[in-house]
Image: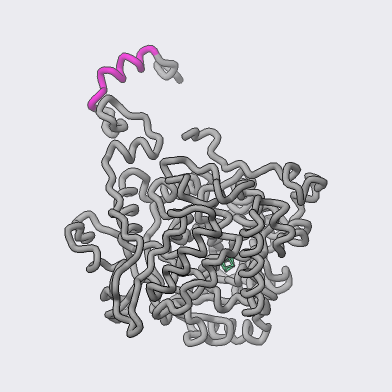
Amino acid sequence: MNRKDFFFKPRDFRSIDLWKDVTEEQWNDPLWQLKNSIHNVDQLKRVIKLSDYQEQEIRRVVDELERQGKDPLRITPYYASLMDEDPFHPDIPKEEKGSDRLDPIFWQSVPTPANLMFPNTGREAAMCEGSRSYGAAYQRYPNRVALFVAQNTSCAAYCVHCQRAKSLDATTDVNIEEINKALFYINYNENIEEVLVTGGDALRVSKKRLQYVLEELSKIDHVRVIRIATRVPVVLPMAITDEMLTLIKESANRYTKGPAKYVYFMTHVNHYREITADFAAAIKRINDHGFTVRNQTVFLNHVNDYFLTLAETFRRMLWVGVHPYYLLQCHKEKGIVHFIAPIQVGQIYMKHLQGWLSGIYRPTYAVNIEGGGGKVLLMPLNFDNLNLNVKIDEKISESGAKVHTWDDKEIYDYEALGRATPQEYKEAIEIMDKFIGRKGVFVPKIILVDEEGNRIETTNRTKLPQFEKQKKAKLLGYKVDKNGMPITNPATIASELDQLYIKSEYKDKR
Ligand code: SF4
């Protein structure tokens, strides 16, 4: 891997039929980007290669999701330019099983027939916001709340895997009274130290609303930290402007008494193909204004469910100033069940990243428990709680497990994977294999159940990944010695180093 040139290179927009006459100035204008986002299949097929059948299937899915009140196809031109021209045969290295993959940006931004599958997933609704809210404030923990400020489906692009699939319909809009009730509650509850301003996307609301919310928070003495949840740096980096960042900086402390409130940006990168020069420039602008950027990655089957993909995503983020802090298990929500990867596999990857990547960019693996139970940590430990000798049927990812929430509740039958009948599963595979044009690419991990809901088996239980030291070193691109290992103790080669040092430019340097 070339560490000097690690940015993913988008396609040149002038080589894409839909934008061949667009100027550089237009392309870099966020308003132009939003106005020219892809909203229908006629536009999409001028950007990526689709067969007649694929086109017809995407139309069918988009129409159906629109009938359900969603706004399911919305891709900024910039984000669309990250997709390979032929997303069904992307240029992904063989170390990441490239021939068995579709383009990761395609999976995240274009609805496929899989989004209409597996309708009875078992228990779902991990977010369950309505039952723990006052106005637009949602609370799960003692000292922090999420403050929803969405205005007219405020995300810059629609992510197909969105875990707020239910709430982000085409009319999402939080009115000012709900926001005022939330601000009242935050002021009332002196335990609230942190407020997560979120949307959809906190940076896609009007300047007036953003300024109002931040200024009101600046007046509340017990609020110490404001977090801004946004995917704009990923899907629309040109919208991260100095003007917007100055507004945030000034508003968040406009009426602060005492120490300044600290502002964090929370973003959402899922794949290293999202780490481009434009993304890095947006992050630099944020950092230059004195804000810290942290990231939540969702562990997504078909997108980033591979050791090297995760490793590259985390390390490249850190190289541009983003701290990965959570790897989140995908929720069980209707329409996104095919994105759920088994917890056991995620734990193995996290175990094998330890030591090979530094602790500051190895995120915590966690799951949000249904019904607003909060995050449950899934991190493997170095004393073996993976139980590698336990039969796969008895593992957390495959069947019900007992989990403990942060407030000492026990949930006995937590199940990470979605459910379907064998018939539903068989039909789903047939439809998706035909859509993709080959077998073995669509591999949902599903618990098959009979008519009474009794478990029969889990699909696609391949052998759990095994890693040797040498293989990890090679995958991560480290230089190795004759034993296949990178240097981890320079003292063992001190005499060799001494000889080289004497001849080097560092000797006698002042
Ligand atoms: S930006 Fe976040 S909230 Fe908005 S659609 Fe994407 S995942 Fe969902």
Residue 261 in sight: no
Q: How many marks?
A: 0
**Where does the image place residue 258, in percent across and percent down from the top left?**
55, 68
Q: Which residues are magenta?
A: 492-503
**Where does the image place residue 215, in percent across and percent down from the top left?**
65, 73
Q: Nearer the viewer, residue 111 or 322?
A: 111
**Where does the image place residue 399, in percent across and percent down from the top left?**
28, 72
Q: Name the residue located 38 percent from the left edge and 12 percent from the top edge.
A: 503
Q: Name the residue located 44 percent from the left edge and 41 percent from the top edge.
A: 94
Q: Name the residue located 53 percent from the left edge and 38 percent from the top edge.
A: 6
For residue 406, above or below residue 47: below
Q: Is residue 370 left or right of residue 88?
A: left
For residue 272, above or below residue 115: above
**Where does the image place residue 44, in percent across and percent down from the top left?**
69, 57
Instruction: Give the main secondary structure of the magenta stretch.
Output: helix
Q: Is residue 278 left or right of residue 99?
A: right
Q: Nearer the viewer, residue 131 or 38?
A: 38
Residue 256 in sight: yes
Q: Nearer the viewer, residue 153 or 388?
A: 388
For residue 229, above or below residue 128: above
For residue 188, above or below residue 455: below
Name, please, the residue furthest toward the top: 503
Q: State which image quarter holds ligand 1.
A: bottom right
Q: Name the residue located 45 percent from the left edge and 49 percent from the top edge.
A: 100
Q: Is residue 405 left or right of residue 20?
A: left
Name which quarter of the figure residue 167 lies in.
bottom right
Instruction: Indicate yes or no whether the magenta region holds residue 382.
Output: no
Name which quarter of the figure residue 497 lies in.
top left
